[in-house]
Image (cartoon, rainbow, N blue to C red):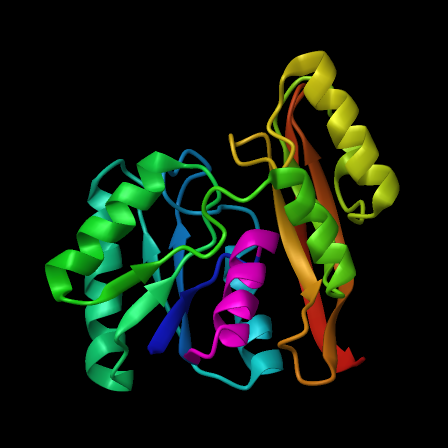
Amino acid sequence: MKLAAMCSGGKDSAFAAYQASRDGHTLACLVTLIPGSPESYMFHYPNSDKTSLHASAMGIPLLKAETIGVKEDELSDLRGLLSIAAQRYGIEGIVTGGLASKYQKVRFEKVCNDIGIECLSPLWGKDQEQHLRDLLEQGFEIIFTGVSAAGFGPDWLGRRLDIDAINELINLYHHYSINIALEGGEGETFALSSPLFRRKRIELLHTEKVWLGDRGYLKILQAQLIDA
């Protein structure tokens, strides 16, 4: 099918787009909703305004819009943007990166049903530790851009996903019952490279850590595409 890939900039949407491409689908565009609040129930907050770098690296168009981030009202903004994608690029469906959030999955499916397109979630139900290992095996470069759960500190902000980080996430799961892949809202990520990037990667030029006592996020203030 011809698909729009929901793109937050994070690891899961990046891998879902890659999986859809490997499954033979055509990625016609990326779609990003930029929430006005970190309290958004549907959309990734830190650095979602930087997904234009993903689109440029992949060589496909990006449709983006802001949403105030109010529960349920976000769906109207999503419906409007997906309707534009269907009219402009002839998409037959979307691909999302959800692994376990029934709240998001049900609502994505409802919006797609409303406008007559399919909703694909290729990562749904996947073992989360295996998902992290697959990201490394397939050559994704991922950094942590937000943390908000017990056991995390500011040292996680800007840290790269590697074997040591995976092992620490497993330990945090055993001690605090966090979701290993951060699917429960424990953290956010940003993809600096992907197999879908056309010999490019994202270089961070200027970042700022914001720490709020027990949680925080990394602001990407300036970044650019460079040759991989």
Decide whether residue 37 is among the magenta residues.
Answer: no
From which residue to which does the magenta span run? Answer: 10-26
Residue in front for this viewpoint, 23 or 135: 23
Where does the N terminus fall, quadrant-wise? bottom left
Q: Quadrant of the C terminus?
A: bottom right
Report the magenta stretch's main SS: helix
- Residue 206, image x and y in percent? 76, 59
Horizontal side of 103 relative to 163 (left or right) equals left
Residue 200 visible in rendering: yes
Q: Nearer the viewer, residue 166 or 76?
A: 166
Q: Is residue 20 magenta?
A: yes
> In this view of the protein, which residue sits in the foreground, 138 or 178?
138
For this orientation, the residue located farthest to the right is 164
Q: Residue at x 19, y 63 (%)?
A: 80
Please provide percent x and percent y for residue 112: 21, 59
Left/right placement of residue 169 relative to residue 191 reads: right
Q: Is residue 50 above or below residue 216?
A: below
User: Residue visible at 47% across and 62% down?
Assistant: 7
Count of number-bearing discs: 0
Residue 227: give x, y in percent of width and height: 79, 84
Q: Position of residue 42 (x, y in %)?
A: 36, 43
Q: Residue at x 61, y 54 (%)?
A: 11
Answer above or below: position of 24 versus 129. Answer: below
Is residue 153 visible from the viewing direction of this image?
Answer: no
Q: Quadrant of residue 210?
A: top right
